[in-house]
Image (spheres, rainbow, N blue to C red):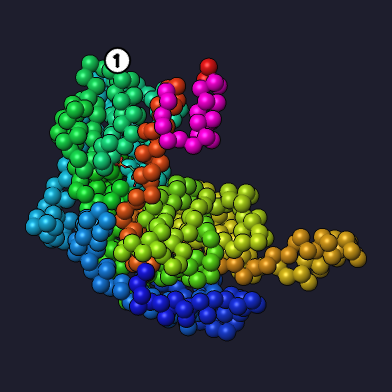
Amino acid sequence: MPNNLDPIWTRLDTLRPAEGRRISDLFDADPDRASGFRIAADGMVFDYSKTSIDAERRAALLELAADLPERRAAMFDGDRINETEDRAVLHTALRNPDRKLVVDGEEISADVSATLDRMAGFADAVRDGSFAGQGGRITDVVNIGIGGSDLGPAMATLALSPFHDGPRTHFVSNVDGADIAETLGGLDPATTLVIVASKTFTTIETMTNAETAMAWMKQSIREPSAQFAALCSAEDKTAEWGIDPSRVFGFADWVGGRYSMWGPIGLSLMIAIGPQHFRDFLRGAAAMDAHFRDAPLAENMPVLLALVGIWHHQICGYPTRAVLPYDNRLARLPAYLQQLEMESNGKRVAMDGTALTRPSGPVVWGEPGTNGQHAFYQLIHQGTQIVPCEFIAAARGHEPELDHHHRLLLANCLAQSEALMRGRDLDTARDLMRKKGLEGEELERQASHRVFPGNRPSTTLLIEQLTPYTLGQIVALYEHRVFVEGVILGINSFDQWGVELGKELALKVAPLLDGEDAPGHDASTLALARDILAMRG
Ligand SMILES: O=P(O)(O)OC[C@H]1O[C@H](O)[C@H](O)[C@@H](O)[C@@H]1O
């Protein structure tokens, strides 16, 4: 971790909230707190006033970002900041093709524009029927991919369903045959387009599912590969699938898998919502990029979102972070952010290979509100661990005729953050029990169950409405948050070596399930494999 930050970390440790210091008191002490601890930019509001960060703590946290301007410039300029893979990190170039940029001696923006235009041409053709299946117009698109080649387009396609006017879109990711069987089961191969999305084009789950889809099509379609498209950074690997190069959309290795939906990996989304809306999505992300590059650090949304995260996890020691979109169409956002945040910053060593002296990223999880309120919010309100909550809400829904639903949704969102901060003390709980006619020991016993400690932190991100543009802003905001946290921790947010060992061992375990001997396995694994063989009969 950057040594120059040691004194700042030490100082921040001393500023950890002391017992009895309440967030609500900060509002009493500072009448302008609500406006002083929020950032409003480009139609979005990020409110972090319901946290224990005050002016002193914010100033100290901002000192942690000393190296950020330099690292940020290095990322946007295409330096090889992904040092363990020796790659540049330029997903931002995908949404800003007008910015001329040279990588490895080659000007990349023309290529980015050309690929985007080619994607748009293909998407339009699928949407208007000029590209058809062997049984007529494409009715269904199946995106086969996993991780970054699935979560982004799947999350965004659901989020933008009010803009969905193209063919039906399906996402198959799991190697569990149930996934592809259930998806293909309802489809007509003659009018289905299969998109194989894989940066490496070697991922076993995706390749297995793609083979199954190819076999499914072969049963009734004369030329199955004519209804396949491929998205990858290893275009040579697509040849053996017989997919015509006009339907192969490539991208460079400077686009990380979990940062890839802005280019070819977003093709299924583009077909669903149309190229124009897809460009709006890119515009929203590019606007957030500009804000991240240009806004002063103290008024910079990704920077503050990151610093709040650092405060809660690395300083206060809260082990997890809940993302709670009060928007049903953002149901897959928590899963998307799990990959983005945990695969990026779930590391154990710094860039130079030395062990981290602070925890890396927290566990990220969540579900849409109000559903979560009736499930796990109990623990958030009264459990013994503190879970910082990130509320996300849009002022307007897409169902004007059901606006009373939306008002109720928003009221719940605001009420939850208020309740988390405010809590309910023992005296108030006693009064409630007294009104119910209880007294003595029973009153005391029942009252204690109705106490809410409160003082539980949350942030709220408000947008006007969930649209392609605002979704682009939100996703780019979180991408940059991950980057800022990574810079402060001194880690490489752009590799993912931690996923390799399990993959390797899966290949070595597989023979056991064929009844073969395989060396080097522990007794538990061998016994479980024998059990599986016995159960399978
Ligand atoms: O796009 P692919 O090459 O198929 O990779 C799909 C996913 O699998 C890998 O294991 C990585 O953990 C992810 O970062 C990646 O997005």
Q: Considering the whole magenta stretch, tell me its main secondary structure.
A: helix
Q: Dividing the picture into quarters, in which one does residue 188 lie? A: top left
Identify which residue, 205 or 1, lies in the foreground.
1
Image quarter (top left, top right, bottom left or bottom right) of the N terminus: bottom left
Residue 406, x across and y down, in percent: 53, 53
Residue that appears at 47% across and 47% down: 331
State how many labels appear: 1
**Left or right, 341 with reference to 432:** left
Specify the quarter for ligand 1: top left
Q: Is residue 90 above or below residue 454?
A: above
Q: Mark 1 Cα within 10 Å, few/some/many (few <14, many 20+)?
A: few
Residue that appears at 45% across and 21% down: 515
Residue 202, x across and y down, in percent: 27, 36
Residue extending farthest to the right is 440
Q: Dividing the picture into quarters, in which one does residue 310 lie? A: bottom left
Q: Is residue 430 above or below residue 196?
A: below
Identify which residue, 59 or 29, lies in the foreground.
59
Residue 111, x across and y down, in percent: 13, 49
Residue identifier under label 1: 220
Residue extending farthest to the front is 519
Q: Magenta region: which residues?
A: 516-535
**Which amino acid lies under the numbered mark 1 shown in the image of this protein?**
Ser
Q: Is residue 116 above or below residue 449?
A: above
**In magenta stretch: residue 521:** yes
